[in-house]
Each structure stands twice: as C-alpha cells, then as structure tokens.
Image: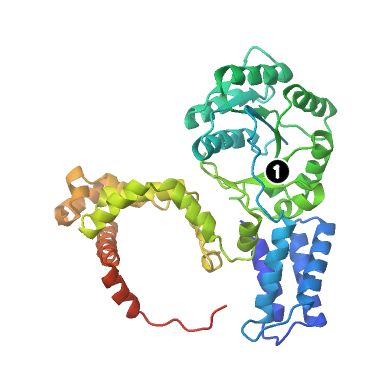
Amino acid sequence: MFSNLQDKLDRAFKVLKGQGNITEINVAETMKEIRKALLDADVNYKTAKTFTDDVKQKALGQNVLTSISPGQLLTKVMNDELTDLMGGTVTELDLSKSPTVILIAGLNGAGKTTFAGKLANFLKEQKGKKPLLVAGDVYRPAAIDQLQVLGNQVGVPVYADRESTDPIAIAKAGVEEGKRNGNNVIIIDTAGRLAIDEALMNEITAVKEITQPNEILFVVDSMTGQDAVNTAKTFNDRLDFTGVVLTKLDGDTRGGAALSIKSVVNKPIKFIGTGEKMEALDVFHPDRMASRILGMGDVVSLVERAQQQFDEKEAAALQKKIRKNKFDFNDFRSQIQQIKKMGNMKDLIGMIPGAGKALKDIEIEDDAFKPIEAIINSMTPFERENPDAIDQKRRSRIAKGSGTNIDEVNKLLKQFMDMRKVMKQMSNPAMAAKMMRGMPKMPGKPF
C-alpha cells in the first residue's frame, strides 16, 4: 500500500541528502516535492498545503544534532505530522451499551457487506461479543445471500426478510430480533448509494432515526481517493457518522482518502481492510500508518497479527519438539497455514522496516506457498513425521504426486533440514549466544 507515495517522498527527502543543516532554501525545495507527491496521491489540495506548511515551520525550528542528518530529522517531523493528520490517536468503537447498534453506510462497491462480515468476526473473536448481522440491502441482487454466506463463514447469525422490500422496517425488526436473542451488538448492512440520490439518502436517514445507532461507520474504497473524501463530507452532513472505514488498502491505493478524510470531515478512521479474508481487518493506528507511509515498517502490527494466530500452548509444545529435533512437516505445514491467515504476503513484508522498499519491484504472490504445500500434502503421514526417511524413491513419488519436479522436492527437503538444524541451535540459549558472538558486526552508525 502507498508504494507510489513512498517512492515520491523518498525522492523528496534526497534533496536534503548530504546537507549539513536545514535551511529555508533546502527545506522549501523539499516541501515543494512533498506537496507534489501528496497531490499526486490525490490528497485534498488544502490539506496538502496546510500539512507542508506545518512541517516546514516545525523543521526550521529544530536543531540538527551531529548524530543525525537533516533528512532523518525531517523524517521524524513528517512522521509526527502525518500521525496528527490522520487523527493522532486510536479511536475504538463505543461498545458500552447493550445492545450496541452499528449502522454501515457508504457508496456502491465500497465493500460494506464484506466489512460487515469482518466486523462481526472481529467483535466475536477479539472482543468476545455476540453479534447479529442484519441484511438491510434490498436493492443489490444477491446482497442478502452474500451476507448470509459471510455470516456462516464467521459463525454469526444473520437476520433477513426476503419478503420485504422496506429497509426501514427490516432494520427495525432486526434490532428487535437482536434484543430478543440476547445479541449485544447488532450490525446493520445497508444498500450502497450515491450522495446525490436524494431518495436513498432520505431512506438511510430514516433507518438511522428508527434504529438510533450508537455507531455509524462510513465505508470508503481507499482506491477512489479525493472523490471518496468529497462524498464522505456529503454523507457526514446528513448522517453525522462516528467513524470511517478504509477498505481495499491491499490494492494499489494512492493514499488520498487516508490522508485527507480526517481533516475534511473531522471524523476518525476506525478500521482498515487489508484483504478479502475475514481476518483481514485492523484497528486503525495513525502512528503505525504514518511509519508505513514513510517506509519505516510497522513491527507492532505484525507482532499483533502473529499473536492472534499463534496459540501459546501450541507454541510451547512446538518449542519442545524443536529442542528434541522432532520438528516435522506436519508442524511446518501448520506454521504456513497460520502465516497465511495473517494477511497477504506483500502487506506483511511491508511491515518489516526496510523490507518494503527493498522488495518493492518484486512481485510476491499470495499463493507462493502452494508448491510447498503441494509437496507436503503428497507425502504419506509417515514421511511427514519422519523427514529423514524420505529417500530418492520416495522423493520421485512425491514430485509426481505434487505436480512438481525432483529438484524442487530436493530443494525443499534441504531447506527444511537446514532450517530444523538452525532452529534446534537457536533453542539452546548457550548455543544461540555463541552464534551471535560469531556474527560479523554490521557497518554504519545508528539512527
């Protein structure tokens, strides 16, 4: 995400490369490039101008220490200002009331129904809630079917009335159903609409009046840029929504919506969608997003995703197997499946500081694990549990069964054996310390 903006900001920072200090002249030139980068990313013009003016004033007021360069100092100022621009702090959902009614609104094709399913999954798994989904889109063909499929997928009930074409009555009945069944969160999916469609705007306003939602979330397709921000303003004038959701951040997003929407409508971004999977929903952290835009990674979010997927008891059991050198292909396959649940690979790699830039021109497919899984799945249970027993005859059979070739099977087995050896060594604190002492020191000075 934001790869084009990252590249242009990098070029802007190069203006200060080699400079001994920050001056009115060199910072003005850098700010000019940054403003152009923001406008190219479809950021609101007034927002871009105010932002660069603020950064310039704060940068000129800083003393450049001998231990850091002007470029590094400007990056720090930029990071702080980007964080403020996108809201400054995390804004969580207000779940204090029971039931909490959440109304989902937005344009056609923004991903509202998918988000509703993700939100239900998030509230169930992360917050321990008992949500109900209400199918309030009576206009889009198969909208009710889609919501029911998503509900089944995440184990959340869906209220739908296929006989009714009145979304106001459906929303009211859905809330009543939730109260009867003891659901403490009721999520109402609504039809996509255009802000200029007065009839549909009146309709969703009526839904708001009848259900009295605690939260109104406006869903924005982050790839639409400035148009989405303008529409958000119109929606906010009518609905006074409580927060924004940015979807499709795993796509080729330019960043305009994320950077502009808070300053234009003065409402916080609460969630971001980072993929099609039901787990691909993150609480929005302005500081972490600022770091990612500047190419500094987001290790905290990466660790949090890992913690959500990896069970402590399983990890302890796995650690014992590693120490005894019993780590096998069943364990390896399980680790792959858990990594896949964390999100798409390019997004995960982008969270590692420096890795996103290093691999920006390399295509990383989400199905990169498929050949490995095919090879493992072609093994017998005995072979998966006893990798050392896989001789040449077995390797040939595995290659044929997996649709790969003998070289790929040999390569995987060698990498697996090497990995298992290193894992066993690293599980021994004394051995790990010895290995670390033997590593060559990296050149360069700290940031």
Residue on which disc 1 sits: 244
Q: Is residue 430 above or below residue 247?
A: below
Rendered image coloring scheme? rainbow
Residue drawn at point x = 68 percent, y = 48 percent: 222
Q: Is residue 156 above or below residue 1?
A: above
Could you tell whether 50 is left or right of 244 in the image?
right
Measured as percent of width and height from the top left, residue 179 is found at 61, 20
Residue drawn at point x = 69 percent, y = 28 percent: 190
Could you tell whether 233 is left or right of 163 in the image?
right
Q: Quadrant of the N terminus?
A: bottom right
| Residue at the top extreme of this rendering | 163
Residue drawn at point x = 85 percent, y = 28 percent: 198
Residue drawn at point x = 20 percent, y = 43 percent: 381
Measured as percent of width and height from the top left, residue 172 is found at 69, 18
- Who is closer to the viewer here, 114 or 168? 168
- Who is closer to the viewer here, 16 or 96? 96
| Residue 196 showing in the rendered view | yes
Measured as percent of width and height from the top left, residue 104 is found at 68, 33
Q: Is residue 99 above or below residue 63?
A: above
| Residue 334 showing in the rendered view | no
Measured as percent of width and height from the top left, residue 262 is found at 76, 50
Could you tell whether 7 is left or right of 340 in the image?
right
Q: Quadrant of the C terminus?
A: bottom right
The answer to which quarter of the image holds residue 189 is top right
Amino acid type, mark 1? Val
The answer to which quarter of the image holds residue 436 is bottom left
